[in-house]
Amino acid sequence: MAQTYLKLGLNLPIKFNNREGLVIKGMGVNNGKSLINKPATRQFLMESIGEEGLKVVRSLMGRETTDEEIAEKTGLKLNTVRKILYKLYDYRLASYVRTKEKDIGWYIYTWKLDLGRVRDILMARKKTTLRELMSRLEYEKSHIFFICKNGDCKVTFDVASEHNFKCPKCSGIMDYNDNQGNLLSLEGEVNRLQKELRNA
C-alpha cells in the first residue's frame, strides 16, 4: 500500500490498520484536548472555521480518521468537511496521510489533528496587533485632530485648515478633538499586549 506522510517532512515509520486507523511509531498523537477548552483557542477556531469547524475538530479528538468518517460522524456534507480540513491544514493545525486503495485505485486521506501551533499563531497575531497599535499611538501623539460635528470624519489640523475647518465630506463645521481618551485607551492596550508577550 503506497503511503505518503505530509506533515513538515517527518520521516517516521508508518503502520496502517484498517480497523484501528493510522499508527505512527515513535510519535504521540497531539490532538489538543486541553487546548480546545482554552478561550483564546476556541475564539481563534470560531473565527477561522466556525461552529461546523469545531464539530470537525471534536470528531478528530483522540483519533485519526478519514474525511468520509468525519462527515458521517458530524452529519456535515463531505465537501464542507474537506474545506474545513484544508483550512486547518493551511494553518498547519492538521495533517494527513494519503494511501492508495489497491482494489479500486482511489486515494484515501486519513487526517490527524495537531492544535499545538495555535499558540504560535496567536502569539504572531498579538505581535502584529501590537505593532499596529504602537504605530497608531505614535500617530495620535504627534498630531492635532479636528472632528466634524455631524460625525462624518476626523482629520488632522493640516487637513482641516486646508478645508477652512469645514468637513471634507459634508462641509459641516469642524471642532477641535481632544484625543486624550484615545491615547489612554491605546496605551492601555499596548501595555496589556506587551505584558502578555513578556509572560508568554
Image (cartoon, rainbow, N blue to C red):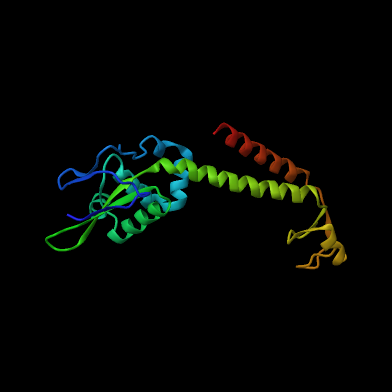
Q: Which quadrant of the figure has residue 191?
A: top right
In the foreground, 151 or 113 = 113
- Coordinates of residue 19 in the picture (x, y in percent): 15, 45
Q: Is 82 on the left or on the right of 158, as rendered? A: left
Q: The N terminus lies in which quarter of the figure?
A: bottom left
Q: Please, which residue is most extreme toward the top here?
A: 199
In the foreground, 181 or 125 = 125
In the foreground, 191 or 47 = 191
- Coordinates of residue 200 in the picture (x, y in percent): 54, 34
Residue at the image point whose x is 82% and y is 63% from the top: 159
In the rendered view, would you say 141 is above or below 26?
Answer: below
Residue at the image point whose x is 15% and y is 48% from the top: 18
- Coordinates of residue 126 in the picture (x, y in percent): 57, 44
Q: Is 76 on the left or on the right of 194, as rendered? A: left
- Determine if residue 148 is in view: no
Residue at the image point whose x is 28% and y is 39% from the top: 62
- Coordinates of residue 158 in the picture (x, y in percent): 84, 60
Q: How many marks?
A: 0
- Determine if residue 150 is in view: yes
Q: Is 62 on the left or on the right of 106, as rendered? A: right
